[in-house]
Image (spheres, rainbow, N blue to C red):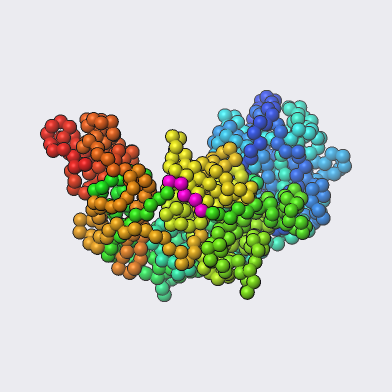
Amino acid sequence: MFRKPILMISVCLLIVSAAAGFDSKRSASVTPLTDFSIENLSLAPRFASAEICSVRHDLGPYWLIQHWVTGMELYKSYQDPSQSCTAPYPFMVEEVDIVMFFNRLCTLIVSVDVETADLTVPSCPVPGNLLSISSEWMYVIPGQGLYLLAVPLDSAVAVNGPYFAGFYISNAIDSSKGACVVTDSLTALCTGYNIWDTTIGYIDLANNDYFDFPGRLILFSVGTTGGSGGVQPAPSITLLQPKNNEIVIGPLTLWASETAGSRIIDFVRFDRRSSGGAWTTIGQDNSGNRPWRNGVDTSGSGNGYSLLFNYSSLTEGLYWMRAYVEDTLGRSDVDSHQVTIDPTPPDVNLINPTPYDSICHPLKLEITTADENVTQVRFDKKAAATNYGVTMPLLNQSRYGDIDGDPNDGNHRASGEFGDYYCGPVAGAIAIKYWFDKGYIYCMREGVNYISVDTLVERLAATMQTRANKGTYDDLFLNGMQQYILTHGNELLFNVYRQPSYHTFRTLFQERELVVILALSGTPGLYLVASGVLGLADGQGRYMTTMSDPLTGINASLYMRDGLNGAEVYYGNSWHPVDMIFTVAGYNHTVTRDLVGLDASSVGGWSYDWSASNMVSDSLYFITATATDATGRIGMATSLTRFVCQSYLKGDYDGNGVGNIGDVLYLINFIYKKGTAPVGGAYRVDANCDSEIGISDIIYAIRYFYSQGPEPCY
């Protein structure tokens, strides 16, 4: 996304010949909408104000207006805050939204504006004088679908009566993109206008010479009542990652949260310095777009104020990391943490066995690591129940978010309450209550008194700013949980993993025994808490799970699978990407594993020849490798495996009972194209028993199949 200043009034930008839009406008047609699922593509964080109000007069999407949108045109919609907002004036207009449909990938360059309502003819208002205009923004429409395009004004504008909101598209749009504006089902004169040529001027969309719209344009504005939105708070920044005093030993995404709710943030910059050195800029993020999860609306997308930091060129030692924020008024704030950075940490790559391998003895357990100071690698096993579950609290968000003193009336947003938006604080409360039941009491204790779950939920909702935002942002979820835990005994550990795979999820949940909170995007965006896993993948690559669902208060059975960018969960008849998972653990909770063996020497690589154990055939096991370096830092990697001991024909890698050239192709596919491991386990690829996997094993197998060499080792 980019934006650039608009230097001229929007109408003056319409330097287009009348002929450019004639043919398209005259060929317009209507099609009824059959799918009302709308994806939110907001270009700025939502407001943090209890007085927020949408000035919207339509009945909702009903008609698609096809073959009308050409681009390089301006749409206008009459707005009267008194029809939808309590005590509306003065009203601060903050944002203009439009609903549009697209048939395929499309780029839009857009801006929005606010104009007075000219009431020369009181019964038919028309656009008047310009009051405010935004910078120009770029949208990339990802594909076919219905989208809410929300664009902020650079500066909120105060109005004391009706006005017009404008949405300007400055680039031409090819007809193949299938761009459509959307209307409701009620025709109304003098409510919506369009201009695409200055010689033609504005036309009333409901009464013109080209095509009369069968309903009101879905174009509206959002702002705050009483004028409170006009003065934005000074920015406040919190550095979320890395944590203070953290030892950084793996990939690092710098992540900060602007917690004041300012809507005029210019940028967030990330800096570093060594102890006693000068600050050096790592980079900056100009977009705070991030998912917004409330169990009702589309989540949106983005990573918030974040930056992937490659620190491989740094020397090991202490560093200060800071986040610096500045708004468009020049006001700033900063937050810094001291961390230890290890550019060559004991990160572990478990190359044998790999996830989902079938294993048998004898078996060589092997890892690689970039840390030259590793002193020991420990290999452990842990039996993994095929069906694994924990007793997770079941909390229904409809019991919370109460404002009228009646917690049993549904607490639905339609009644002005907040329960429908509470999946964030309720998911956090589920995790805290789980550990409370295991003896970690301080998160539900204030002074000498214990608090109820109801109070806990409201405490979390306050720290996560859920009511103000009518939902929960991931950065505020993380910051809220960390701050709450810190001020309530600090006996729980909180962490986050971005775009996890199913294997990562299962390892954290079952092997590490953590409480796992999944942040799902899509429609709606929501949080779920894992409570069980059932078996392995079915024939469609799906894994059955159970989740404590804050939206319903039940233990829901849901499919999970690996998508293109990580795990996905099938919820509400659609697949939802898992943007990230948050984990909660008790400080003193330990995981019991069985030692398999140790390697205290890097000679010949870090490995262990495993020859025997008391493992149960056709059962699942987690195999974990833990590397420890000379400074005491550790790194871990785990593979979920199936123990299946049976004899395989040497050279028969595809398991069809015959060794031939087809098995060579199978090896090539596995080694160079990340194909399926040989039947019996990846260790069988080592045809020449040199503990290395590569072209030499392929050549070895070829010679064997043509009777020119000895048989493979496994």
- Which residue is at a point 71% across and 41% down the rendered structure image? 219
Q: Is residue 703 left or right of residue 420?
A: left
Image x and y of residue 169, in percent: 64, 40
Observer able to see residue 290: yes
Main SS of residues in magenta: strand
Which residue lies at the image location 64% right of the left edge and 42% below the top edge?
148
Please give left or right for residue 659 compared with residue 405 in the image.
left
Q: Is residue 575 left or right of residue 311?
A: right
- The residue sitting at 49% across, 42% down in the picture is 544
- Magenta stretch, residue numbers: 386-390
Q: Is residue 618 magenta?
A: no
Residue 124 in percent (x, y) is at 84, 39
Is residue 321 in view from this perspective? no
Residue 363 locus on image (x, y percent) = 25, 49
Q: Is residue 331 left or right of residue 622?
A: right
Above or below: residue 317 compared with residue 98: below
Q: Residue at x 65, y 57 (%)?
A: 466
Residue 357 horizontal/vertical position (percent): 33, 44
